[in-house]
């Protein structure tokens, strides 16, 4: 009887997926829980991944005509009240400031003092306060479009939190645009969704489905919500980005009006769109394995780590010089729009411990160099997308000449692996019994081991969605934008359907 393979992360994904996720975050040194319940401290390795995401996305936004600005953290409560659906959607998640200062109480402990005339909401999202400002800035059609993005933090009072995936405070960007015509706003909504999808697939190596949310899942106050949905390795869906067509709803509640070319007063058409540090959680759950984090080369804080073998004092100087020169030569090359970043790890710790630390951190390439390698002018190389003990000797010149191709091959391998996994766990289902069986765990001890994505004809409504969600904890993730027209019958209502939609359990 064979013994169970040893892994750097316990439990494994199959044993306890939620706990595996938490252990990967810790082992990769990405983040830690903060003293404030539900909030997190993003550590340097995790924050560098976020910075790399920011750099790419920020350039995408600017290349499509957007500019950055910043709006207040605090929003007067009356602003949220102006848009009924919006405040209803966020009311239970709002953090509220009611006092302006602290003072010592009778027992010497600090207590709130000076009640505010109007409570302030710590922004859960900024549509209302940005709308108020746009109403001041827009007078004529010549003032449009306004294409603004902000990088910020937001607060949503979550009951159940998980690092990166769902925290009380998180980092994100939120784009807010105002347009003279409905068509312009619709084009903006679709354009930004495409930018998110391109980023997810070509930078995160994470395949996504572009789709529209059902009325039940739509952003509060929007006419329509577009999204990208990705499959994680526990076969749950994760909403990785959203782009909202807000129609004239917020323009009417905030008073964003302008004189058109015929000097007639019109309400503007607005959009909003955003992604957050949840993308780091998506990256972890799309690619990582039972030995730790795996980071796609395009977003990795360091694409290569050089591990000099320094056992013998007489060869130490020679090995370090060789490794330093190798680091310099690698950093002179460009991959993914930036200079290749290399870590030379000279710490005085056991070689095996050092190797496993970098395995768990997900660095795409590990390069070991010792005296014997120098004699052969070769490098001992391991790829993170392969088993940890799989290494091979590569001539130094060959390694340098092919480094960008190697990094891109790792990037492509991760994407193709994730895409194949999604295809394997996506099933067309045409009757209700099969649908329920697909989402019913075969083993109560491992409730996450359900089916995956169900591609189903749909002619239901919000009430039917509620029933499915209550009975199975399954939601309609999206109506695919690229889905083919296909005649069929909805298995829940028996009504004719023109297209399949995606149902899944989700984060």
Image: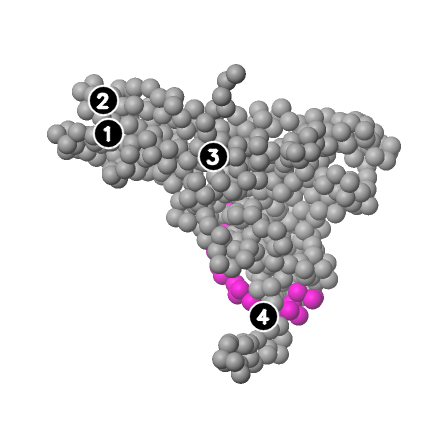
The x and y percentages for residue 210 are 63, 37
Where's the C terminus, which quadrant? top right
Mark 1 or mark 4, which has the lower sequence index?
Answer: 4
Q: Earlier in the sequence, mark 2 or mark 1?
A: 1
Disc 1 secondary structure class: loop
Measure how far apart labels 3 and 1 are at the Cα level.
Answer: 26 Å
Residue numbers of the magenta segment? 63-82
Q: Residue at x 46, y 53 (%)?
A: 41
Q: Is residue 268 above or below residue 506?
A: below
Disc number for residue 309: 1
Q: Which residue in the structure is indicated by mark 2?
A: 373
Q: Is residue 191 visible?
A: no
Task: Report which residue position mark 3 lands on.
Answer: 9
Classed neighbour count for the residue bearing mark 2: other residues with Cα under 10 Å, few (<14), some (14–19), many (≥20): some
In the shown orientation, is residue 437 left or right of residue 71?
right
Say whether marks 2 and 1 touch (CB < 8 Å): yes
Q: Is residue 416 magenta?
A: no
- Which residue occupies the extreme top position in the image? 1
Q: Residue at image x 76%, y 29%?
A: 437
For the residues carrying marks 1 and 4, which lies nearer the camera in this image? 1
Please tell me which residue lies in front, 451 or 1: 1
Q: CA distance from mark 3 to mark 2?
A: 31 Å
Is residue 66 in view from this perspective? yes
Q: Could you tell me which residue is drawn at 60 percent across and 64 percent down?
A: 95
Relative image position of residue 269 (x, y in whole percent): 66, 55
Disc with the residue nearer the chain's start (2 vs 4): 4
* Residue highlighted by disc 4: 97
Closer to the camera: disc 3 or disc 2?
3
């Amino acid at each position: 009887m064979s013994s169970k393979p040893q892994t750097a992360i316990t439990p494994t994904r199959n044993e306890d997926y939620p706990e595996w996720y938490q252990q990967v975050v810790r082992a990769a040194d990405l983040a830690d829980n903060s003293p404030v319940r539900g909030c997190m401290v993003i550590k340097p390795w995790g924050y560098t991944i976020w910075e790399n995401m920011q750099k790419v996305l920020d350039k995408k936004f600017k290349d499509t005509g957007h500019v950055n600005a910043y709006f207040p953290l605090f929003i007067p409560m009356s602003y949220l009240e102006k848009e009924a659906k919006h405040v209803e959607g966020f009311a239970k998640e709002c953090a509220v400031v009611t006092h302006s200062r602290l003072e010592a109480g009778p027992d010497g402990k600090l207590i709130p003092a000076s009640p505010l005339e109007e409570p302030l909401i710590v922004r859960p999202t900024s549509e209302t306060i940005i709308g108020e400002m746009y109403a001041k800035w827009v007078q004529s059609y010549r003032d449009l479009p306004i294409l603004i993005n902000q990088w910020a933090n937001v607060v949503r009072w979550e009951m159940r939190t998980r690092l990166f995936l769902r925290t009380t405070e998180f980092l994100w960007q939120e784009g807010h645009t105002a347009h003279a015509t409905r068509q312009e706003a619709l084009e903006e909504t679709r354009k930004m969704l495409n930018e998110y999808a391109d980023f997810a697939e070509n930078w995160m190596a994470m395949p996504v489905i572009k789709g529209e949310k059902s009325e039940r899942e739509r952003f509060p106050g929007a006419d329509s919500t577009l999204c990208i949905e990705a499959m994680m390795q526990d076969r749950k869906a994760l909403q990785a980005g959203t782009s909202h067509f807000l129609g004239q709803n917020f323009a009417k509640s905030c008073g964003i009006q302008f004189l058109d070319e015929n000097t007639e007063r019109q309400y503007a058409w607005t959009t909003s769109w955003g992604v957050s540090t949840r993308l780091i959680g998506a990256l972890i759950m799309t690619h990582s394995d039972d030995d730790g984090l795996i980071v796609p080369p395009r977003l990795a804080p360091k694409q290569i780590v050089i591990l000099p073998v320094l056992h013998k004092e007489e060869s130490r100087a020679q090995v370090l010089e060789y490794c330093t020169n190798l680091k310099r030569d690698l950093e002179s090359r460009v991959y993914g729009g930036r200079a290749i970043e290399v870590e030379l790890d000279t710490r005085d710790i056991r070689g095996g411990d050092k190797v496993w630390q970098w395995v768990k951190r997900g660095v795409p390439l590990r390069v070991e160099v010792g005296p014997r390698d120098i004699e052969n002018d070769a490098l001992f190389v391991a790829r993170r997308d392969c088993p940890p003990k799989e290494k091979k000797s590569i001539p130094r010149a060959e390694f340098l000449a092919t480094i960008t191709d190697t990094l891109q091959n790792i990037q492509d391998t991760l994407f193709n692996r994730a895409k194949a996994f999604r295809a394997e766990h996506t099933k067309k289902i045409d009757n209700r019994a099969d649908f329920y069986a697909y989402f019913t765990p075969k083993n109560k001890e491992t409730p996450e081991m359900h089916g995956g994505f169900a591609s189903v004809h749909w002619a239901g409504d919000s009430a039917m969605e509620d029933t499915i969600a209550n009975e199975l904890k399954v939601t309609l993730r999206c109506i695919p934008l690229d889905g083919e027209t296909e005649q069929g019958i909805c298995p829940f209502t028996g009504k004719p359907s023109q297209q399949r939609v995606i149902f899944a359990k989700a984060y």
